[in-house]
Each structure stands twice: as structure tokens, then as C-alpha cells.
Image (cartoon, grey):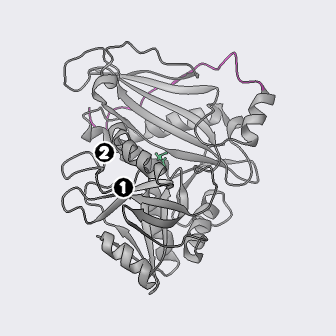
Amino acid sequence: MTATAPALEFSTTYSSNPVPAQRRAEILADPGFGTAFTDHMVTAIWTPDGWHDAGLRPYAPLSIDPATAVIHYGQSVFEGLKAYRRDDESIWLFRPEANATRMQRSAERMALPQLPAESFIEAIELLVRADAAWVPAGGETSLYVRPFMFASEVFLGVRPAHHVTFCVIASPAGAYFASGVKPVDIWLSSEYTRAAPGGTGAAKCAGNYAASLVAQQEAIEHGCGQVCFLDAVERRWVEELGGMNLYFVRADGSIVTPELTGTILEGVTRDSIMTLAGDRGYKVEERRVSIDEWRSGVESGEITEVFACGTAAVVTPLGKLKWDGGEVGTGAETGPVTQEIRSALLDVQYGRAGDPHGWMRRVV
Ligand code: COI
């Protein structure tokens, strides 16, 4: 199948047993991240003759045979995007077409089928419309939407699955980090790498996140909120954190992000920041950044701020960089450029600013 495959037709079955309004209100008052789920989900099945059985249905556990291929070989990709409620109660998605095409690229790398971009977006819109009451209001809350696709064939041979499930679920979300918008300290992993050339680093596949966990555990043990990975070849170039991209703000007014080398995830937030910062007159560079440049830049004052970005993390200031035997940075506060970029992004997403790049898509 190709990206030009016919669009899916979705059926609709509403839940007869939704979460009571009072319980939903309690959840929305303090949503946290990734713990509560809405009343519906969308699913669709792919077999070699194409996509079928697409529809909105009540949220429910998926019944998985113990021999389902994804459990054994990890043939699985996912996406993350958010729906935002504005002051006028309208609900909007941010750049869903960017997630649609990234899922197509991830699927291609993982030998999963292509889902037409319009069907990816329609599935999300169906779910957000059905569960509009689950989109929180106020602060920086949103409905985090998680589309994913996995090998659902019951078969233990190692080959691309002939039965694949696409699913979209949604979860009301507050801040990703429990500490809120405070600088997060970073642990530099010296033992582990995230991705090697020719590997799956640029794909948003489950295995990349699984591979980051032991290093993330090490970060937590050292009092850090996230781990930073270096390239797998020279162990010198800064790549990304466990689940987010990185930006450096320089004293000369430029901002720099590690260039895409095939081992770094092409973050939608990363890309949007490049445009927003350019709009504000910053010189934006995509280039390799060595770990020595990070360390010595912070020490000398040439690097004034470092921040992480991602759909879940939005723009999160980074504090100290720690490694076995040392640390740099104070990380006392969110820097002014980080704050400016963060506000610029959120203002577009919540409709408080114009949308000159046509990123927002109204759903409700
Ligand atoms: C996202 O930002 O949407 C991600 O998928 C990353 C994960 C840390 C939640």
C-alpha cells in the first residue's frame, strides 16, 4: 500500500457507559499526564488487502493473544499531538498533518502499512469531537492524543505483520513534568546510546523509547529529570533527550539545535520553534553540537540557556548538565529566550496570537 491508498470510512458507536460527569470534572481539575483516558477510541485494521473495520468505539482494553507479534518483536510506531480548548470554547489541533506524515515515515521504517494522512486526521477529529467534554480548559492544559499502529498478527515468525492495528486514544493533560515549568536537570549518559546510523532513531517507534529507559533510570538515580544521549559513533555529538529535542541559546542571539542526521527524531515542536524563532529575528542554526561545546559554552557564558521541546514537554527549561564526575550550569530559573519562545508557541496554540503559518485546525 502507498500513501495514496483510498481514505478509510469510519463507523461510529458511542459509549453507553461514559465516565460520570462529576468524575470527569475531578480528573480535568488536575489531569497530570497520561493516567486518565476518555470515553472513546478509534481503531482500524490493516491486512494485505487494505484497511477495514475503521470506527469510533467505546474505550476498552484490546484483547491480545500471547503470540501477537508486537509483544515479541516490537513492530510498533506512535504519535503524540494535542487538542487545545480556547477561551471561546472552540477546540483546535496543532499541525496534525505533520504528525500524519511523520507516522507514515515511521511506519515505512518499521515495515508497517501506510495510513492515508487524511484518514489519520479524520480519526483524530472523530475522537476529539466525540470526547470534546474531555478537553480541559484553563492554564496549559490540553487533550493529549496518542495515535499508534502495531503488528497485531498472531504469528511468531520474524517478518512484517500481515495484520496491523491502528488505534487512537486520548488523555487529558497538564504539565508533563510533575514539577511543572521548572528547570529540569539532565544526566549525560556515557554508557548508553539511543540510536545508530542506519537504525531507527528518526522513527517514532516504541523500541527507541524502551531503549532509553535504563539510561533514564540512571538519570533519576542521579537526581535528574531526563537523560541526554550522544551519537553512537564518536560519542561526541549531542543528539536528544529520552523523549524530547534540544535547543541552545547563545549569547550572540542565535539559537542552535542538533541537525537531523537520521538518528534524531524530527520533532514537530522542534520544527515549529525554528520558524517561530526565525519570525522573531533570531538566527536559527541546525548543526552538530558537541558535548564540549555545551559544557564549555555554559561555563564561559557563550551558551546562556538550554531548553527541551516536544509535544508533551512543550518548551521546558533545562538546568544543570550532570555526568559521572562533574556538572555545569545553575538552572535556577527559566531564561528569557526560553520564556519568549514558550509563550510564542502557546499563544499560537491557544489562539491568543495570530497563526501566520496556518498551523491550527479547528475541530469543534
Ligand atoms: C511527545 O512529546 O508527544 C512524546 O511522544 C514524548 C513522550 C516523552 C511523551
- How far from the left and from the top, in percent, is residue 264? 32, 55
Secondary structure of the residue carrying numbered label 2: helix
**Which quadrant of the figure has residue 6?**
top left
Q: Are marks 2 and 1 in contact (CB under 8 Å)?
A: yes
Q: Position of residue 20 (x, y in %)?
A: 77, 24
Which badge, 2 or 1, is on the more N-terminal residue? 2
Of the pair 330 and 209, the residue shown nearer to us: 330
Q: Quadrant of the N terminus?
A: top left
Q: Residues within 10 Å of mark 1 (few under 14, many from 20)?
A: many
Is the residue at mark 1 in contact range of ligand 1, meaning its CB lies under 8 Å from it?
Answer: no
Is 267 above or below relative to 286? above
Q: Residue 187, percent across and down?
A: 42, 58
Q: Residue at x 46, y 54 (%)?
A: 222
Q: Which quadrant holds the C terminus?
A: top right
Q: Magenta span covers which residues? A: 1-20
The three-letter amino acid code for the residue at tag 1 is Glu
Residue 287 at least partly seen: no
- Whole-angstrom CA distance, mark 2 to mark 1, is 10 Å
**Disc number placed over residue 130 in the picture, else none:** none
Q: Which mark is residue 266?
A: 1
Q: What residue is shown with label 2? A: 105
- In the structure shown, which secondary structural element does the residue marked by tag 1 occupy? loop
Place residue 214 in its image quadrant.
top left
User: Which one is closest to the eye, mark 2 or mark 1?
Assistant: 1
Q: Residue at 35% x, 53% y: name it.
A: 265
Q: Is residue 335 visible?
A: yes
For the residue marked with disc 2, what is the amino acid?
Arg
